[in-house]
């Protein structure tokens, strides 16, 4: 080697070496490895194939701007769960006290794992299948499992968007169609529909007019044509947003990501002006500190963190794979995680301001109905007028006056009080009636909006917000399917996207039959929870333990230009895997302790009733869990016993634009050294003095060579102090 070369100068210098071989090679001329002595795989040079590979790498779609990318990630992570799941859990698990375990788990589980997925997607620039095939071929089933879970979730998630579309178009009329019970004519007599009279107008409209629901999952009842059309519209919207790739879906995100915040702020301002809104918010954030010691609260908080950020679905990896290599994904992870959290808090304020108003309306209705009962008892001398406090005015009866009168009657008529059939009419009881999911959006919220001035306007805004939240999440979910499949199998994007949407619509018809809502509940509860937990645990293990946390931190340092905090080292290596394992164990125990079931709407009783799944439904439920998890052991076995190729016998090095990218698998330590040092594979390096590792940027200690021969990244870059003839 020339005496004035950069390597020789550093070798003979007494200065501390701080550059890697990759940095040294950045100053050298690019080398075509396939026509050079570094082509140790013996691969024939194919100029056309090489050109296609380079063109594929350079022409990969990219985000038009950083803002577009951030909005896409926010639109994906902020979904319907922030609006109707988080407020329910907050109320159920101690109000303000629930925010503490949620925030703690967001920091120690959510943020590190979200950062991990963003980093691997951006570094490798492939979808979930390509990423995990590259990191650890034997765990390549992670990507396929993610695709399956995305498919299952997308099937029923788009049905919810279809419901929102139906309510959206029904909102363009005054009065709203769910504000009053329908009148049925029986000959010359007009009577109120019995099912509606025994429940409520909004409940009746949801179960009968919208779903036309059957009494159990076993009663199919045929297709609901209205919901079938709405589902077709929903899949058409998703397909149109996806078919032109991220340039198209990214532009959609400008509206779909920002519009929900506009609606939430408008609802919050309007809600705070409603009578009783403060009661709802005060009830919401009154902490029940004893709940913080309940393990169930922590389990539900961990599950919500896990699904709120969309971990394991592949959508996060897919979106980040379209970024530039030097993008600051650590900033992105922190920003999106906490925007997600604050969105949940904002939605909670809105929900309970509205529910506080609704609780006051229902409480006043209760007072009026029971006051009429008391007047009837007074007129028939069942109750004495002496029991009524003198200041009580029945024409302007307040909740406070009624409660005072109620306590007096209960004390005096203690032996016969139950026979009177009087209710306490406590505001606290109304506020404690927790509702979630479809019950919150399509029953409780719609009922509250019937009491709003200009109710159709607010209804249109609310359901347009739900459609946008759903579309944002669906675009990310579909990207978790299309991106890895297109990257891996090189299929035509337009053809695959259209085919996927058509196939999903056909399969999704199971959700728009009269018993479809029960299948939505089944898929929501069981198709994703356990498989995704396993997927994320294996993702964590693949990066932190198989590839190596130290090497991954070094890769991030080179990619980001700064070294991430040591906090991530310990969370990736120890804290997150342990917490996720505990969550998975708790989920399995919960599944065994509580037999799977669902809430069925019984038409004759006009009420919900909890039913257990029949045997055939249990078989479907178990099949969903097994099918979503099946790629994990299947791919491992196939590649462990070399039944399919994992590319582990290929060794290739590409010098491009001053950077060295490598693909090393199944190499012994001496093979790796030979790869770095030898001119041809057959040469054996001469005896060398002790190796000296070069330090990466920002490192304080030599980077250790990997002892795992099967890692896709191979070993760290190493330069040995060898005779010049060897180099």
Image (spheres, helix red, strand yellow):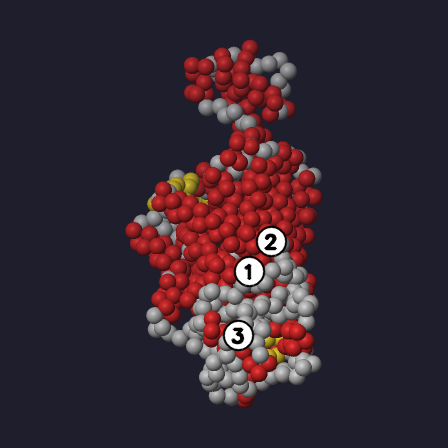
- Whichever of labels 3 and 2 marks the residue nearer the N terminus, that label is 2
Q: Is disc 1 in contact with disc 3, using a CB cutoff of under 8 Å? A: no
- Residue beneath the point at 58% across and 22% down: 402
- Residue beneath the point at 55% across and 27% down: 426
Q: Is disc 3 in contact with disc 2, using a CB cutoff of under 8 Å? A: no
Label 1 Cα neighbours within 10 Å, binned few <14 / some 14-19 / many ≥20: some
Q: Quadrant of the N terminus?
A: bottom right
Mark on residue 550? 1
Mark on residue 688? 3
> x, y (%) of residue 414?
45, 14
- Whichever of labels 1 and 3 marks the residue nearer the N terminus, that label is 1
What kind of element bears circle 2? helix
Q: How far is mark 1 from mark 2, CA to CA?
A: 10 Å
Q: Is residue 179 left or right of residue 670?
A: right
Q: Is residue 639 left or right of residue 116?
A: left
What kind of element bears circle 1? helix
What kind of element bears circle 3? loop
Along the line of sight, the residue nearer the viewer: 292 or 644? 644
- Residue beneath the point at 35% across and 66% down: 637
- Residue beneath the point at 66% across and 84% down: 2
Q: Is disc 1 in contact with disc 2, using a CB cutoff of under 8 Å? A: no
Q: Nearer the viewer, mark 1 or mark 3?
A: 3
- Is residue 603 in view? no
Label 2 Cα neighbours within 10 Å, binned few <14 / some 14-19 / many ≥20: few
Residue corresponding to mark 2: 566
């Amino acid at each position: 080697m020339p005496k004035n070369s950069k390597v020789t100068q550093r070798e003979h210098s007494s200065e501390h070496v701080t550059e890697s071989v990759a940095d040294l090679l950045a100053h050298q001329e690019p080398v075509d490895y396939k026509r050079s002595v570094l082509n140790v795989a013996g691969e024939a040079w194919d100029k056309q194939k090489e050109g296609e590979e380079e063109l594929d790498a350079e022409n990969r779609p990219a985000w038009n701007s950083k803002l577009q990318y951030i909005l896409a990630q926010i639109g994906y992570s902020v979904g319907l769960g922030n609006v109707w799941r988080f407020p329910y859990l907050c109320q159920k698990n101690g109000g303000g006290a629930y925010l503490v375990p949620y925030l703690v788990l967001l920091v120690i589980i959510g943020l590190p794992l979200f950062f991990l997925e963003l980093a691997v997607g951006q570094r490798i620039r492939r979808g979930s299948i390509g990423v995990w095939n590259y990191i650890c071929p034997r765990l390549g089933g992670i990507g396929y499992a993610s695709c399956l879970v995305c498919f299952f979730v997308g099937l029923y998630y788009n049905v919810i968007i279809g419901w929102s579309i139906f309510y959206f178009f029904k909102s363009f009329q005054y009065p709203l169609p769910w504000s009053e019970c329908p009148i049925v004519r029986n000959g010359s007599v007009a009577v109120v529909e019995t099912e509606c009279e025994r429940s409520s107008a909004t409940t009746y409209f949801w179960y009968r007019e919208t779903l036309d629901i059957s009494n159990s999952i076993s009663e199919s009842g045929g297709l609901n044509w209205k919901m079938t059309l709405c589902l077709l519209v929903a899949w058409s919207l998703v397909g149109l947003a996806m078919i032109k790739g991220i340039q198209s879906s990214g532009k959609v995100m400008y509206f779909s990501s920002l519009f929900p915040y506009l609606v939430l702020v408008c609802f919050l301002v309007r809600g705070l002006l409603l009578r009783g809104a403060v009661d709802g918010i005060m009830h919401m954030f009154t902490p029940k500190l004893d709940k913080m010691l309940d393990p169930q609260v922590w389990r539900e908080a961990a599950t919500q963190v896990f699904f709120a950020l969309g971990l394991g679905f592949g959508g996060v990896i897919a979106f980040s794979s379209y970024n530039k290599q030097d993008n600051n994904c650590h900033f992105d992870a922190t920003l999106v995680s906490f925007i997600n959290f604050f969105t949940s808090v904002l939605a909670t304020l809105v929900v309970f301001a509205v529910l506080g108003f609704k609780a006051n309306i229902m409480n006043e209705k209760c007072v009026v109905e029971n006051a009429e009962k008391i007047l009837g008892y007074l007129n028939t001398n069942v109750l004495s007028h002496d029991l009524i406090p003198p200041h009580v005015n029945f024409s302007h009866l307040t909740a406070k006056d009624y409660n005072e009168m109620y306590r007096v009657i209960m004390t005096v008529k203690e032996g016969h009080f139950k026979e009177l059939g009087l209710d306490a009419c406590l505001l606290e009881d109304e506020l404690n009636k927790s509702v979630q999911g479809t019950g919150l959006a399509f029953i409780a919220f719609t009922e509250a909006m019937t009491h709003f001035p200009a109710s159709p306007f607010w209804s249109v805004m609310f359901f347009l917000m739900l459609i946008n939240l759903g579309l944002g999440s669906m675009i990310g979910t579909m990207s978790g399917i299309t991106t890895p499949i297109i990257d891996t199998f090189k299929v035509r994007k337009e053809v695959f996207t259209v085919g996927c949407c058509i196939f999903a619509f056909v399969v999704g018809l199971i959700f728009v039959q009269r018993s479809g809502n029960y299948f939505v509940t089944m898929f929501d509860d069981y198709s994703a929870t356990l498989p995704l937990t396993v997927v994320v645990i294996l993702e964590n293990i693949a990066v932190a333990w198989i590839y190596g946390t130290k090497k991954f931190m070094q890769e991030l340092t080179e990619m980001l230009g700064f070294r991430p905090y040591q906090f991530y080292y310990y969370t990736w290596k120890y804290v997150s895997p342990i917490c996720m394992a505990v969550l998975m164990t708790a989920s399995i125990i919960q599944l065994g302790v509580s037999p799977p079931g669902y809430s069925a709407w019984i038409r004759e009783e006009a009420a919900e009733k909890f039913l257990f799944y029949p045997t055939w439904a249990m078989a479907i439920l178990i099949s969903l869990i097994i099918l979503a998890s099946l790629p994990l052991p299947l791919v491992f076995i196939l590649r462990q016993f070399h039944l399919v190729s994992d590319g582990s016998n290929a060794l290739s090095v590409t010098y491009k634009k001053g950077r060295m990218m490598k693909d090393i698998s199944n190499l012994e330590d001496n093979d790796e050294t030979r790869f770095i040092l030898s001119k041809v594979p057959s040469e054996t390096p001469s005896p060398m003095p002790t190796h000296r590792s070069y330090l990466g940027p920002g490192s304080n200690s030599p980077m250790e060579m990997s002892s795992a021969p099967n890692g896709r990244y191979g070993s760290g870059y190493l330069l040995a102090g060898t005779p010049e003839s060897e180099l």
